[in-house]
Amino acid sequence: MVYNVVGSRNQERECILKSNRFGYLYLLTTIILFSTYEVVSKTLVNKVDPFQVNFLRFFIGGVLLFFVILAKGDIAIKPKDLGKTAVVGIINVFFSMNLLQLSINIPNSKASIAAVIFSSNPIFVTIFAALIDREKIKLYKIVGLMFGVLGVIMISLNGMKQGFMNLKSPLLALLSAVLYGLYTVLGGKVSSKIGSLKMNSYSFLLGSLALLPFLVLYKVPVLKFDYSATFQIIYLSVFVTGIAYLTYFKGLALTGASKGSLVFFLKPVLASVFSVIILGERITTNFVFGTILIIFGIMLVLYWNKLSVKIGLKRGEV
């Protein structure tokens, strides 16, 4: 009888570990794609209006995902869930992403700095998860967050040293991060009920359609833009919006909102690397030390349970 219980527990642990591995693989895919967002968006400055960029990427991404759920015969959604999905879409598309686009488009702003500040959103995910989902913030998560934040600050200072930056840009990026944290928690709740594919499809479409009257009112062209930017628009729509958001919520479903979102601290590292390759920005000592702190913070949160078992601590004590 004892052996059956032990065997059952071992199988349960193996299932959890396997689930976590898939979850982090999904999140890694997301972060790689998300890390290209600010860099690619910077190449669109003076070619495509920032609000137009968001409308196009989320509308196209939403349509693509809708065809997927249509092919699966799974387009039905209850009015109550549709309303929640609309709220989630507006928070993300209309507010958070537009603020981030404005941050990138401000003169003298840097794509890498916007990416770094936006990467602080796991802090707000943890706070909103505690308030809304009543997720307990354990000590090791707080310590991991502190290392991550310190790393983000170091990389931000690195960017500040490289040139003058309008203060509006980091403030807009920070506000975008706060709203994205709220979106992540609320979106996770809706996604767990109707599925991430359906939630993303409808939230993208409803969020982009909510942006449409704004474009018309301020006479921002909807489809007319510099067509030399077509490749970037397609990339942002299909990969950064369609695929990345889908893997994001799949990953969060397997790892939990507060823990899974901490992988966002990899974004400033990858975004800075892409900035070097594409935009020619330089890596300094601050970047190296900031990277080390960020990775240490992530490793602490992701592998604390394994470490605590090895050193004889009970799970859940800290």
Image (spheres, rainbow, N blue to C red):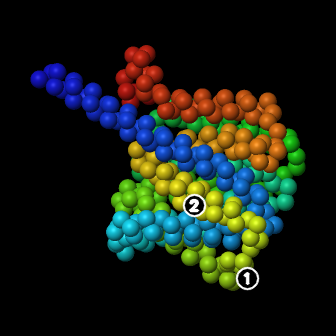
**Residue positioned 46% across, 46% down in the render:** 251
Decide: few, some or many residues near mark 1? Use Cα within 10 Å; few <14, some 14-19, many ≥20.
Answer: few
**Residue positioned 72% across, 44% down in the render:** 274
Report the mark closest to the observer, 2 or 1.
2
Q: Is residue 156 above or below residue 225?
A: above
**Residue positioned 44% across, 42% down in the render:** 23
**Residue 181 position within the rendered picture, expressed as x and y whole percent measured from the top left:** 55, 53
Q: Are marks 2 and 1 in contact (CB under 8 Å)?
A: no
**Number of numbered tags placed on the structure image:** 2
Q: Is residue 303 above or below residue 89?
A: above
Decide: few, some or many residues near mark 2? Use Cα within 10 Å; few <14, some 14-19, many ≥20.
Answer: some
Q: Residue furthest left?
A: 1
Q: Closest to the observer: 231 or 271?
A: 231
Q: Which residue matches tag 2? A: 238
Task: Report helix, strand or loop for mark 1.
Answer: loop
**Residue 174 position within the rendered picture, expressed as x and y whole percent measured from the top left:** 68, 53
Q: Is residue 262 above or below residue 246?
A: above
Q: Closest to the observer: 317 or 200?
A: 200
Is 258 displayed left or right of 309 in the figure? right
User: Mark 2 belongs to which amino acid?
Assistant: Val
Please tell me which of labels 2 and 1 falls first in the chain: 1
Is 11 displayed left or right of 200 in the figure? left
**Residue 105 position within the rendered picture, expressed as x and y whole percent measured from the top left:** 78, 61
Q: Residue 219 — which label?
A: 1
Cα separation, mark 2 vs mark 1, equals 26 Å
**From where the camera sits, is residue 294 visible?**
yes
